[in-house]
Image (tube, rainbow, N blue to C red):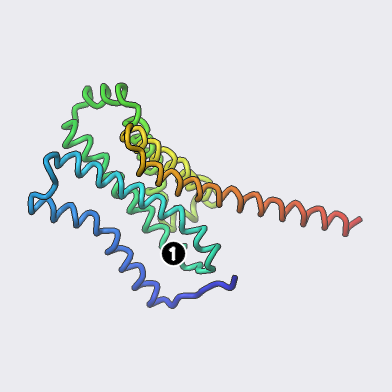
Amino acid sequence: MLPVQLSTMSLRITKVMLFLICLIPLGRLVILAFIDGLGVNPIEFITRSTGTWTLVAILTTLSVTPLRRLTGMNWLLRLRRMLGLFAFFYASLHLTTYLWLDQFFDPAAIIKDIVKRPFITVGITAWLLLLPLAITSTNGMMKRLGRQWGRLHKAVYLIGILGVLHYWWLVKLDVTEPTIYATVLAVLLGVRIWHTWRERSAKARATVKLQRTVQ
């Protein structure tokens, strides 16, 4: 498929629109807070909302490369960084809500909760893995790390798995929504595995062909 180009101005407009779209969940929470629309348990509402949008942002980030390969729209890669940073942003809001509004920054209570509820451990681990990805998301860090940058940012797949597991263990009974997220993640992981296998097979065939030619 031929690459689909996008003008500089169109790309800028697209980025601005995406930025505003990514702020909608936060804006919704702010508006609901002002009109007393967060329900009988506002802390749980905020926690669930920020957690859900974190997972959505992570899966959307993971879908960029497959969509680019499928459609030829290489400019989609220019949006991936913003999506990843918003995933970290909502994950940080999710974690802050838990640490501040739920546990009041009480170390003893937090440690006790981590030991008692494994899904908390999984969630915090996912955030800790997201942190270095956010820190190294700049062009400068990309150049500085070289090939290591790509290897480091492959951790986003593990983060996606941990995010789905965190949600699954949290829900316990009705796992309909976690199942949907798990299915989407499985498809994205499957596409990546298939593409990697195809690339390696092509390289192996090219190597064999070259060796036969030399002989």
For disc 1, the marked residue is 78
Which residue is at 37% across, 58% downward?
Answer: 82
Residue 51, percent across and down?
29, 44
Q: Give whichever of 147, 177 is nearer the camera.
A: 177
Rendered image quadrant of residue 80: bottom left
Question: Mark 1 belongs to which amino acid?
Answer: Arg
Neighbours of disc 1 within 10 Å: few (<14), some (14-19), many (20+)? few
Location of residue 165 with respect to 117 vertically, above or below: below
Side of 153 where 23 appears, left or right: left
Residue 207, percent across and down?
78, 54
Q: Give whichever of 146, 105 is nearer the camera.
A: 105
Which residue is at 72% across, 54% downward?
Answer: 203
Residue 84, percent across and down?
38, 53
Rendered image quadrant of residue 117: top left
Secondary structure category for the residue under label 1? helix
Q: How many tags in the picture?
A: 1
Q: Residue furthest right?
A: 215
Location of residue 73 with respect to 190 vertically, above or below: below
Which residue is at 34% across, 36% downward?
Answer: 123
Location of residue 172 with respect to 140 vertically, above or below: above
Side of 134 where 23 appears, left or right: left
Q: Quadrant for the C terminus, please.
A: bottom right
Q: Give whichever of 151, 183 is nearer the camera.
A: 183
Residue 134, percent across and down?
38, 49
Q: Quadrant for the N terminus, please.
A: bottom right
Which residue is at 40% across, 57% downward?
Answer: 81
